[in-house]
């Protein structure tokens, strides 16, 4: 697993490119909400424009963030397992990746497509299946997996 | 979230990138929804959606900012 922000640290033997995202939000326990993401494997051209090859959306309600600066105390590493389980059962604290779905980026809302275009997106690759056989089933959530839904 | 792109048949990323006319591969990630707010490196509140590749500020302990794209 890569450990830093640089792509070179996430390439292994020149044969694998890893994605490692572990977002947290201290607003999660306050609002009971989740963070929603769209992640794409992209092919980058020499001019830094890029095409999407595979795109998936996912959500996380991880709140593994030190809240001491706010005077709160729901810090994961301070909780006993019993307390953590209690909070999960109460819907107050979950720490999970869920709702994973492979999508067609062409079907995204126009504001997101506009943002992608502004960031150098050149569209979805025309025929990925003839170019690559991508192991989409290698997409996996971090544990716990209790709310994991299979790829569509 | 962990994901891996590994070309089939033992091909290297560089070989497959060349086939597709790419310089290299990367991951692009957009934050579609986020509770509360985020503060960017310039001190301004960041609206969603946004592309994490271009984000300079901190975002929890997220590790998806591959800057050499």
Image (cartoon, coloured by chain):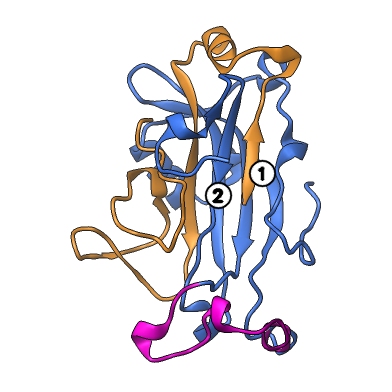
Chain colours: A blue, B orange
How far apart marks 1 and 2 lie (CA) works out to 9 Å
Q: In this view, does A24 lie to the left or right of A98?
A: left
Tell me which corner region of the image, top left, top right, bottom left or bottom right, holds residue A5.
top left
Tell me the number on the disc at residue B56: none
Q: Is residue B7 above or below residue A146?
A: above
Badges 1 and 2: C-beta atoms under 8 Å apart?
yes
Q: Which residue does the numbered mark 1 point to in the structure image?
A: A103
Q: Is residue B19 above or below residue A95?
A: above
Q: Where is residue A16 in the image (x, y as percent from the top left)?
A: 61, 26
Which quadrant holds the N terminus of chain A? top right
Neighbour class for label 2 at 10 Å: few (<14), some, many (≥20)? many
Judged left or right of residue A41, residue A100 is: right
Q: What element carries label 1?
A: strand
Residue at (57, 9) in percent of width and height: B15
Q: Are discs 1 and 2 located on one and the same chain? A: yes
Q: Quadrant of residue A61?
A: bottom right
Q: Where is residue A98 in the image (x, y as percent from the top left)?
A: 70, 61
Image location of residue B45, percent across then percent down:
27, 67
The residue at 60%/84% (across/down) is A79
**Chain label for disc 2:** A
Residue range corresponding to the magenta coloring: A65-87
Disc 1 crowd rating (10 Å Cα; few below 14, some 14-19, many 20+) is some
Tell whether B32 sits left or right of B5: left
At mark 2, the secondary structure is strand
**Residue drawn at the location 23% of the way across and 58% of the way down:** B41
* Foreground pick, A151 / A61: A61
Residue position for label 2: A38
Does the magenta segment cover residue A75?
yes
N-terminal-most mark, 1 or 2? 2
């Amino acid at each position: 697993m890569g450990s830093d922000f640089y792509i070179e640290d996430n390439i292994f033997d020149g044969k694998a490119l890893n994605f490692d995202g572990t977002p947290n939000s201290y607003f999660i326990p306050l609002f009971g909400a989740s963070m929603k993401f769209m992640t794409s494997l992209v092919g980058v051209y020499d001019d830094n424009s890029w095409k999407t090859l595979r795109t998936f959306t996912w959500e996380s309600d991880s709140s593994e963030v030190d809240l001491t600066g706010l005077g709160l105390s729901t810090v994961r590493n301070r909780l006993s397992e019993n307390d953590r389980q209690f909070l999960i059962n109460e819907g107050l604290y979950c720490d999970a990746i869920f709702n994973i779905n492979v999508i067609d980026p062409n079907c995204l809302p126009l504001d997101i497509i506009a943002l992608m275009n502004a960031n150098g997106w050149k569209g979805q690759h025309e025929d990925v299946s003839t170019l690559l056989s991508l192991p989409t089933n290698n997409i996996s959530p971090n544990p716990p997996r209790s709310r994991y839904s299979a790829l569509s | 979230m962990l994901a891996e792109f590994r070309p089939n048949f033992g091909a290297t990323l560089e070989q497959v990138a060349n086939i597709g006319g790419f310089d290299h591969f990367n991951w692009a990630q957009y934050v579609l929804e986020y509770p509360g707010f985020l503060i960017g490196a310039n001190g301004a509140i960041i609206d969603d959606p946004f592309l994490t590749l271009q984000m300079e500020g901190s975002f929890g302990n997220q590790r998806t900012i591959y800057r050499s794209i």
